[in-house]
Amino acid sequence: MSMAFAIIAKYAFYHPDSPAGPSQFYQYLSFLSFLIPFLVPIPLLLSLIWFRRASINLNKYVAGY
């Protein structure tokens, strides 16, 4: 779950010429959710929300449309 969320967070905010930006904070949050159990719903909800944005960003930069 944590790895899937990290990938979705990375590509939801992906732009080729910019640094990691806010995605790095969310990746740390997903890894922190293993240590603090009440944080587990946050990565789950955010991955559902950001999945479409991440797939659009990947299609735009990988496939060219």
Image (tube, rainbow, N blue to C red):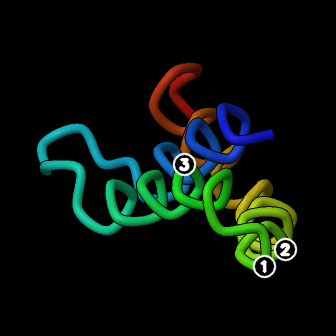
Residue in the foreground of this view, choosing between 39 and 14 = 39
Q: Is mark 2 on a helix, strand or loop?
A: helix
> What is the x, y in percent for residue 51?
78, 54
Question: Image point 59% across, 55% down: which residue?
Answer: 30
Looking at the picture, how far across and down is residue 46, in whole percent?
A: 73, 71
Mark 2 crowdedness (10 Å alpha carbons): few <14, some 14-19, many ≥20: few
Residue 48: x percent and y percent? 87, 64
The quadrant the C terminus occupies is top right
Check the image and name the residue furthest to the top: 63
Total of numbered circles in the picture? 3
Which badge, 3 or 1, comes first in the chain's sequence? 3
**Disc 3 marks which residue?**
31
Q: Which amino acid does label 1 sit on?
A: Phe
- Work out which quarter of the rendered image holds the N terminus and state it: top right
Looking at the rendered structure, the secondary structure element under dot 1 is helix
* Left or right for 45, reference 9: right
Q: For the residue carrying disc 1, how many other residues have a C-alpha within 10 Å: few (<14), some (14-19), or many (20+)?
A: few
Q: Which mark is residue 48?
A: none
Which of pointers 3 and 2 lies earlier in the amino acid sequence? 3
Residue at figure coordinates x 54%, y 48% from the top left:
31
- Identify which amino acid the numbered label 2 is placed on: Pro
Residue at image mark 2: 41
Does the residue at mark 1 contact the one at mark 2 (Cβ under 8 Å)? yes
User: Which residue is under mark 1?
Assistant: 38
Q: How far apart are marks 1 and 2 (CA)?
A: 7 Å
Mark 3–mark 2 Cα distance, whole angstroms, equals 13 Å
Q: Measuring from the top left, give residue 52's x and y in whole percent.
A: 79, 57
